[in-house]
Image: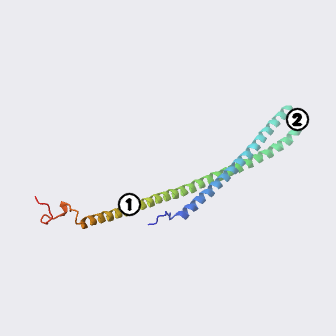
């Protein structure tokens, strides 16, 4: 048995880990774009609100000449707000898709990591089992050699249980 642990799906595990890393980076990029688009939309929304407040103030003062230019500016700003809000919505949807893709890749990578860990533990158990079998074999050989020496030594009396009852060296009652 090989002493070194080799996970047979190691290449696939590395690929899945790399895919998860790429998906995480893509998620972060999409999230950043979504935030930026939302900030831009909020800036335009603020400009529109301030412009409307200015027009309301001018209406109270009854200055009609600057109001038509302000109205056109507000209309343009309103259209810009709609564009920015749509861009923010699209960017947020892309960020949500990227987050889902990242979660999927992360689950796949984690599953292979767990499979690798289980395989490694099984490998270690087999190594321990193999080592224990070798140690048992060595112990049996030593015990066998010790018994062989003891039986081969004529000066040492054999245990009474090993002798047949009619043997000449059997203890007499």
Mark on residue 97?
none
Residue 126 at x, y = what percent? 42, 61
Q: Which residue is mark 1?
A: 132
Residue in the foreground of this view, choosing between 76 and 25: 25
Placement of the C terminus among the 4 image quadrants: bottom left
Residue in the foreground of this view, choosing between 56 and 5: 5
Q: Is residue 118 left or right of residue 29?
A: left
Secondary structure of the residue carrying tag 2 is loop
Comes first in the chain, label 2 or label 1:
2
Mark 2, mark 1: which one is toward the viewer?
Answer: 1
Q: How many residues crowd around disc 2 within 10 Å: few (fewer than 14), some, or many (20 or more)?
A: few
Q: Is residue 61 left or right of residue 89?
A: right
The residue located at (88%, 39%) in the rendering is: 66
The residue located at (60%, 55%) in the rendering is: 101
Q: How many residues crowd around disc 1 within 10 Å: few (fewer than 14), some, or many (20 or more)?
A: few
Q: Place residue 70 in its image quadrant.
A: top right
Q: How many marks?
A: 2
Q: What's the CA distance linking mark 2 and mark 1?
A: 99 Å
Residue at the far left in the pictured view: 173
Q: Which residue is mark 2?
A: 63
Q: Place residue 69 in its image quadrant.
A: top right
Residue at the far front in the pictured view: 155
Placement of the N terminus among the 4 image quadrants: bottom left
Residue 35 at x, y = what percent? 69, 47
Residue in the foreground of this view, choosing between 37 and 147: 147
Secondary structure of the residue carrying tag 1 is helix
Residue in the foreground of this view, choosing between 79 and 169: 169
The residue located at (83%, 33%) in the rendering is: 57
Q: Place residue 140 in its image quadrant.
A: bottom left
Q: Is residue 89 left or right of residue 173?
A: right
Residue 20 at x, y = what percent? 59, 57
């Amino acid at each position: 048995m090989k002493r070194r642990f080799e996970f047979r799906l190691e290449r696939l595990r590395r690929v899945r880990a790399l895919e998860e890393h790429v998906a995480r980076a893509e998620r972060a990029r999409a999230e950043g774009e979504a935030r930026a688009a939302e900030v831009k939309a909020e800036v335009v929304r603020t400009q529109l609100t301030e412009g409307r407040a200015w027009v309301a103030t001018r209406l109270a003062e009854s200055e009609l000449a600057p109001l038509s230019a302000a109205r056109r500016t507000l209309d343009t700003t309103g259209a810009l707000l709609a564009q920015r809000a749509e861009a923010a919505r699209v960017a947020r949807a892309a960020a949500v898709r990227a987050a889902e893709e990242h979660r999927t890749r992360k689950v796949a990578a984690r599953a292979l990591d767990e499979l690798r860990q289980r395989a490694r533990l099984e490998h270690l158990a087999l190594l321990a089992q193999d080592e224990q079998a070798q140690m048992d074999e060595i112990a049996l050989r030593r015990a066998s050699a010790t018994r062989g020496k003891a039986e081969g030594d004529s000066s040492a009396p054999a245990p009474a249980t090993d002798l047949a009852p009619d043997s000449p060296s059997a203890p007499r009652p």
